[in-house]
Image (cartoon, helix red, strand yellow):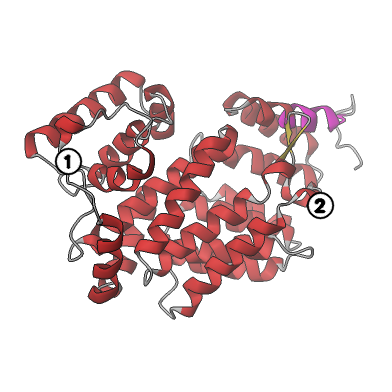
Amino acid sequence: MAWLVRTGRNVAIDRIRREQTLRTKTQLLQADQQAHTMDDIDLDDSTIGDERLELIFMCCHPALAQDAQVALTLRALGGLTTAEIARAFLVSEETMKRRLSRAKSKIKATNIPFALPADRVLPDRVVAVLAVIYLIFNQGFTDRDDLAAEAIRLGRLLAELMADEAEAYGLLALMLLHDSRREARIIDGQIVPLAEQDRALHDQSKVDAGRTALDHALALRLPAGPYVLQAAIASLQCEPRIDWPEVVALYERLEELTGSPVVALNRAVAIAEAGDPGHALDVIDSLELGEYRYLHSTRAELLRRLGHTEQAQCAYEHALRLAATDPERRFLQRRLSELRIPTNGGTSAE
């Protein structure tokens, strides 16, 4: 996530200083509100309602470290437990408890207000808020419909507030386009890859809304940031016939912008779908992603396509050990059962 925040900040801060629009929108959202302090708010309360946007801005105050900003916001919204946040950060639950405690103490000690920031500093705070909202969506997209819906709602509010910020609309578009595939993504308790999904189950109203948000972002004619690029990719993936070479080109731009090995992994997937699984495997084998579970499941799939059955079996078994959800495990188990390894040690015909 750090790459998203760092790169987005570099792209965004110098280009969203349109003071008049910000002032107008801020005044609309702050009307009839009073600023609160930490003493007025229970950060574990999940019933804050329409004040949640202000809560996120408080939790994303620059006095807090970036990881604390995200963790505290996730906890304060009441959607994630400390254990779930710890898994998202790949740290122990006790470490996350201490991190949250320090963040809350700092809010109290520095008297950080519960209110939208002044319009002159609002642009500088938006990038961290975007990252928080996207992390909430990603957590919800796996198995928490309520969190995903909350992230989309917050994304809409932020886009309204930051009407001149392309990345806010890019994030909203990205979430809507991904969420449009929710009903087709898991069938009978198993993950269904995009290529195998029943597109009749895709929510066309969310596709249309996502593309409208993307069009708004592009109409601002600003340099495309990471959310806008990802939304453009997601829009292409909603087409009945996906232009995979164009998807590869967009991932190349996104990789240049972010330097993220996860983006490189996604580019490799697109390369394979464009017809070159051998090159895709070379890209994957050059990445340093350690025990990142999608690296191993993707590598297994490419080995399967290339007919390297025994190596594919080993890679699927490795991915299965790393799987985090039951739908992932069932999918990987099905892929393993489909591999037929002859007793003579040769590869199976597919």
Task: Name the spot of residue 117 as percent of width and height, x first.
Answer: 20, 55
**Magenta span contains residue 200:** no
Secondary structure at badge 2 equals helix
Toward the top, the furthest residue is 94
Q: Amino acid at mark 1?
A: His
Q: Is residue 198 left or right of residue 117?
A: right
In the rendered image, the vertical position of residue 323 relative to residue 269, given as above or below: above
In the rendered image, the vertical position of residue 221 relative to residue 263, given as above or below: below
**Magenta span contains residue 337:** yes
Decide: few, some or many residues near mark 1? Use Cα within 10 Å; few <14, some 14-19, many ≥20: some
Q: Is residue 145 visible?
A: yes
The answer to the question of whether label 1 and label 2 lie on touching residues, with beta carbons closer than 8 A, is no
The label number, if any, that marks residue 36 in the structure image: 1
Magenta-drawn stretch, dominant element (helix, strand or loop): helix
Secondary structure at badge 1 equals loop
Between 37 and 224, the residue placed more toward the observer is 37
Task: Name the spot of residue 231 as percent of width and height, x first.
Answer: 55, 62
Residue range in magenta is 331-341
Q: Amino acid at mark 2?
A: Ala
Task: Name the spot of residue 310 as percent of width and height, x first.
Answer: 77, 33
Q: Is residue 253 left or right of residue 9?
A: right
Instruction: State the image quarter where residue 187 is shown.
Output: top right
Q: Is residue 234 left or right of residue 156?
A: right
